[in-house]
Amino acid sequence: MMYKEFGKTNFKTSVIGMGTFYDALWIAWAMIFKVQRGKAKKLEALKAGLDSGINFIDSAEIYQSETIVGDAIKGRKRDELFIASKVWSNHLRPDKVEKSCRRSLSKLNTSYLDLYQIHFPSSRVPISETMGAMEKLVDQGLIRNIGVSNFSFAQMTEAESALKKHELASTQMHYNLTRRDVEREILPHCEKERIAMIPYYPLAHGKLARSARGEAIERICKNHAGISYSQVALAWLTTRSPQNFPIPRASKSAHVKDNASAGDVVLSPDEMKTLDSTF
């Protein structure tokens, strides 16, 4: 597993992380009935990822998976892990930001978050208010870095400008071989300012693990000792930019181990060109 500095945080994370958004129905069951379906398998998957060298886990208060992450990291060296979570869009007033953060810390069974992100921008709460609250959390030692998620380029740069004492560490966006709109403005800005990009749905809901355009990927797989389609799709992201830290979903141990192995793969310029032209 390769590791690199996450933006400007001075923390080296694995180039592949683990996401803990399972699906909307899973969240509904967890919220309404307090039932985390398949919890044992998801916990096993997270532990398998940690054992494989992944040290970056992303969660969110809305995901209802923070307690599973807390169980997965129990007994591990906390200072070797990079744990991220997100505050939901109806909790962006300063008082609610802190309450949400403390609630997440309790569920994760940790005293601090390495990264706390605004899950979605709000049209009702000025970004300056929320960013002020996020900076206060940094000053209190409850979080170490501030991020955003699902922000447009204009919204992201506005969020950056709203920060007075600290810098924006990351942005999290839908990004993969078939969804590349972030490459117009957001990714170039991230590369210029050393802001980490966290691609979610890096395997396009599993479609890139079984792509109909498999002939091109198949040739690349053979070039790298028969790696999987998923590993090629993840390696494309990590090779594409030093700021990319994809977070495929961690729900099955076998898949997580396969994803972790992609952290050792670097694609050649010709292979990158082949994938760009194919997709």
Image (cartoon, rainbow, N blue to C red):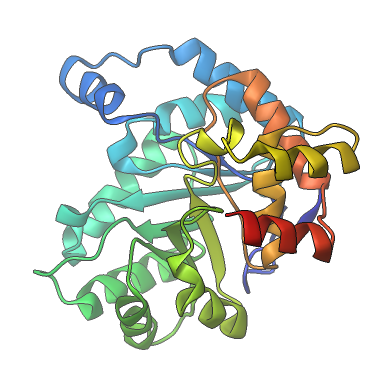
- At x 51%, y 20%, the residue is 42
Q: Please indicate whether residue 273 sits to the left or right of residue 196 in the image.
A: right
Q: Percent position (x, y) of residue 256?
A: 64, 28
Quadrant containing the C terminus in the rendered view: bottom right
Of all residues, the one furthest to the left in this rendering is 124
- At x 68%, y 24%, the residue is 48
Q: Quadrant of residue 98?
A: bottom left
Q: Percent position (x, y) of residue 125?
A: 13, 70
Q: Please indicate whether residue 129 sits to the left or right of residue 115 in the image.
A: left
- At x 75%, y 28%, the residue is 51
- At x 50%, y 65%, the residue is 145
Q: Please indicate whether residue 161 sits to the left or right of residue 175 in the image.
A: left
Quadrant containing the N terminus in the rendered view: top right
Which of 9 and 25 lies nearest the eye of the viewer? 25
Which of 175 and 105 lies nearest the eye of the viewer? 175
Q: Percent position (x, y) of residue 109?
A: 47, 34
Q: Percent position (x, y) of residue 198?
A: 52, 57
Residue 174: tell me if it is visible.
yes
Establish if 102 lies above or below 207.
below
Establish if 156 lies above or below 57.
below
Establish if 258 lies above or below 153.
above
Q: Quadrant of residue 35?
A: top left
Residue 14: tell me if it is visible.
no
